[in-house]
Image: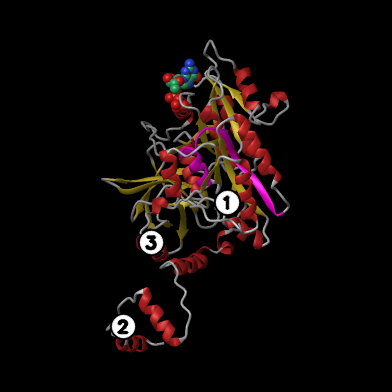
Amino acid sequence: RSAGDVVRFLLLQGEPVTATQTLSDDAIELFAAELGAKVKLVDPGQEQEAELYAKYFSDDDIVPQGEAEWRAPVVTVMGHVDHGKTKLLDRIRETNVVAKEAGGITQHIGAYRAQVDNKFVTFIDTPGHEAFTAMRARGAGVTDIVVLVVAADDGVMPQTIEAIDHAKAAHVPIVVAINKIDRADADPNRVMQQLSEYGLVPEAWGGDTIMVELSALQNLGVDDLLEQLVVLAEVLELTSTKVGRAKGVVLEANLDPGRGPVATVIVKQGVLRVGSNLVAGPAFGRVKALIDEAGNPVHEAEPSTPVQVLGFSEVPSAGDEFRETAELSVARQIGSMREQRIRLAGLSAQSGAAPGAKLEDLFEQIKRGETATLNVIIKADVQGSLEAVTESLRKLERPEVKLSIVRRAVGGINENDVSLGAASNALIIGFNVRPDRRGREAAEAQHVEIRTYEIIYKMLEDIEAAMVGMLAPEY
Ligand code: GDP
């Protein structure tokens, strides 16, 4: 229908509009009913954006024909508080980052590259699993290897176990750094024994986990760790290509009073250059300058290289994917569409966490004939009930419904469980335990479903009901 038809119709309905005005959803529905047409309301801009995205970033276009080349592994350091994560990162930065020009002082840009012989290892400069999980929740898996720092005097502690869970849920291999071996009470053997209980068995004992004993404080064994990372990277066959348009992930970003939006990105593919046109979330722009970890301007950044980007129109969010476009106008068009969609949806770009799995959705999955997988995190009051709950859940498994236990532990449901739940699309089951306040708030914000039970058969009833699509809603 022409704009004139619409105007005429609405006028008859007592709604005077002009042809340049935007119609409300109600008005459109009214008009459609008149025509006998169906209306599909979609998120404003979303469809157009999807079309544009497909047009400019179709896989045929991005999968470049270039040769796969070795790329540096991207490493995140995790572990319990005070076990030496920061010290280790500092030590490596001090001794292995080549300050490329005289007087070059290493800067904290969020990541850096350490040189090992003629190869590189890229370290994410923020230790701990929070950033790791936040990135993963946004679909940005950037870490190739997790270095798990365990203090030899303290052994495996709660956050050590959390870190193992996070790495495993993300299918990222773990290299263990047994730190503080200079301490008189250091007991690396005890650490290995404890880790073996969590499935990390050292190579020396017939397992396949690389474990390096070191002292970040005294700079002992740190080189050995770096070499092991290079070897593992080769085994993992990490490759990329420098051909084709650049793409990668935004690690962190902020507004610099003097320089405008500054984003640290890690290039995953292609070569990012000064002058490249980019879009990352709603932000777009032409690269004005690239700055490396030594604070020096560089002309280009290859795969696995972290670099600060100047030239974005606004500050992108950590975890946003960035893409190079041939024309600045395309980057702008896609950026503005997203901007509009975000604004209209009243969402901030930061709150884009993936929703957790819902029990109600299970049946839908089964109906579609997919093998449904229910990801769960199980928390219980005591070890005994944890075992019992796990056992009985396992019995519900059948060919079409798989159960994947992302974490099981004794204790209340906290914020960490929720963030793991969001990142791995898991349902949280509490047995005789409840979420604490922050856990509850996080679950609401991140749309993670928590179900708590006091009786095992009630829990089994619910899950069985969900499998056949008969789940009663939870009030
Ligand atoms: P993080 O919380 O894991 O980042 O731990 P830090 O790197 O802040 O280290 C905690 C404390 O342990 C600091 O006082 C460090 O100096 C100390 N530390 C770190 N590595 C070593 C080490 O290899 N040996 C000894 N003796 N102390 C260390």
From the image, tell me which residue sits under label 1: 241
Asked if labels 1 and 3 touch by Cβ distance under 8 angstroms, the answer is: no
Question: In the image, is 42 to the left or to the right of 366?
Answer: left
Q: Nearer the viewer, residue 429 or 291?
A: 429
Q: CA distance from mark 3 to mark 2?
A: 25 Å
Which residue is found at the position 44% from the left and 40% from the top? 439
| Residue 118 appears in the picture as rendered | no
Q: CA distance from mark 3 to mark 1?
A: 37 Å
Q: Amino acid at mark 1?
A: Thr
Asked if labels 2 and 1 touch by Cβ distance under 8 angstroms, the answer is: no
From the image, tell me which residue sits under label 2: 19
Q: Amino acid at mark 2?
A: Ala
Q: CA distance from mark 1 to mark 2?
A: 50 Å
Question: In the image, is 205 to the left or to the right of 146?
Answer: right
Q: Position of residue 339 (x, y in %)?
A: 37, 61
Nearer to us: label 1 or label 2: 2
Disc 1 secondary structure class = loop
Q: Nearer the viewer, residue 161 or 74?
A: 161
Q: Position of residue 145 (x, y in %)?
A: 57, 37
Q: Which numbered marker is on residue 345?
A: 3
Q: Nearer the viewer, residue 253 or 72?
A: 253
Disc 2 secondary structure class = loop
Q: Which numbered marker is on residue 469?
A: none
User: Considering only order in the chain, which callout, 2 or 1, is on the residue closer to the N terminus?
Assistant: 2
Q: Is residue 415 covered in magenta?
A: yes
User: Considering only order in the chain, which callout, 2 or 3, is on the residue closer to the N terminus?
Assistant: 2
Q: Which residues are magenta?
A: 400-423
Query: Relative to 11, is 70 above or below?
Result: above
